[in-house]
Image (tube, helix red, strand yellow):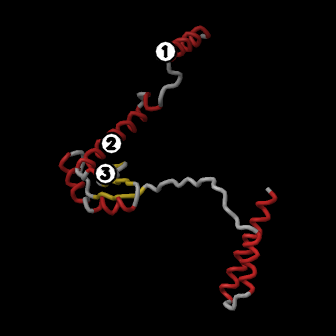
Amino acid sequence: MAGINLTVSWVIYGSLMSKNKFFKLPLGYEGKVLSYYKFQQQVQNELLLIIRSSLPGHLANHALYCVATRNKILLYTDSAIWSSQLRFYHQQMLQSLLASKQGSFEVLQIKIIPSTVEKKGEAVKIPSKENINGLFNQAENQRDVVLKTALLKLAGTLNKLSKTDSSD
């Protein structure tokens, strides 16, 4: 029994080494579940190509992904601006999908993929002590209560930030 396990592991090791790959990509397996998802991805990519071919060039680049269900297509784009532009071609996209005979789709929804915003680690510039004291002085001389309160809050916040910034 130990000889069989050793032989099997050597065959697996030898096949991995012969291809110069140590790991097999998940979609490289031919299992039933993964092959089903692979097929679905291929169908949806074909539908996306059909949709893109029915659009003008500048809009085709903004049709990013599509997901097909029974009678509904979800088309994903990168911003609300392009979404509104794509809605003008709604009927044209549906007609091209029907002409392709890839399915009978009745509904086409256009959705937006939210973009990720990366915050840069820029340091916040805090005004000098003289400017913060100037805000306190301006607040004391204000007759308008709302403006006076706002200036006092701003000066107080800046004063706290300058103390924590100088202690770091």
Classify the position of the C terminus by image quarter: bottom right
Work out whether mark 3 precedes mark 1 in sequence or the reverse, and give the earlier one: 1
18 and 2: which one is in front? 18
| Res 3 quadrant in image | top right
User: Circle 1 — which element?
Assistant: helix
Q: Residue at x 53, y 55 (%)?
A: 117
Q: Nearer the viewer, mark 2 or mark 3?
A: 2
Give the Cα distance between marks 2 and 3.
16 Å
Q: Amino acid at mark 2?
A: Asn
Q: Residue at x 75, y 85 (%)?
A: 140
Work out whether mark 1 precedes mark 2 in sequence or the reverse, and give the earlier one: 1
Place of residue 51 in the rendered image (x, y in percent of width and height, measured from the top left): 27, 49
Place of residue 134 in the rendered image (x, y in percent of width and height, measured from the top left): 73, 77
Q: Amino acid at mark 3?
A: Arg
Q: Rate crowding at label 1 as few (under 14), some (14 to 19) or many (20 or more) other CA atoms within 10 Å.
A: few
Kindly identify which residue carries mark 3: 70
Q: Which mark is residue 45?
A: 2
User: Circle 2 — which element?
Assistant: helix
| Res 87 quadrant in image | bottom left
Give the Cα distance between marks 1 and 2.
32 Å
Kindly identify which residue carries mark 1: 15
Work out whether mark 2 precedes mark 3 in sequence or the reverse, and give the earlier one: 2
In the displayed structure, would residue 100 be above or below residue 4?
A: below
5 and 48: which one is in front? 48
Q: Rate crowding at label 3 as few (under 14), some (14 to 19) or many (20 or more) other CA atoms within 10 Å.
A: few
User: Circle 3 — which element?
Assistant: loop
In the displayed structure, would residue 2 be above or below residue 111?
A: above
Residue projecting furthest to the bottom: 143
Give the Cα distance between marks 3 and 1.
42 Å
In-image side of 151 versus 109 (left or right): right
Residue projecting furthest to the right: 167
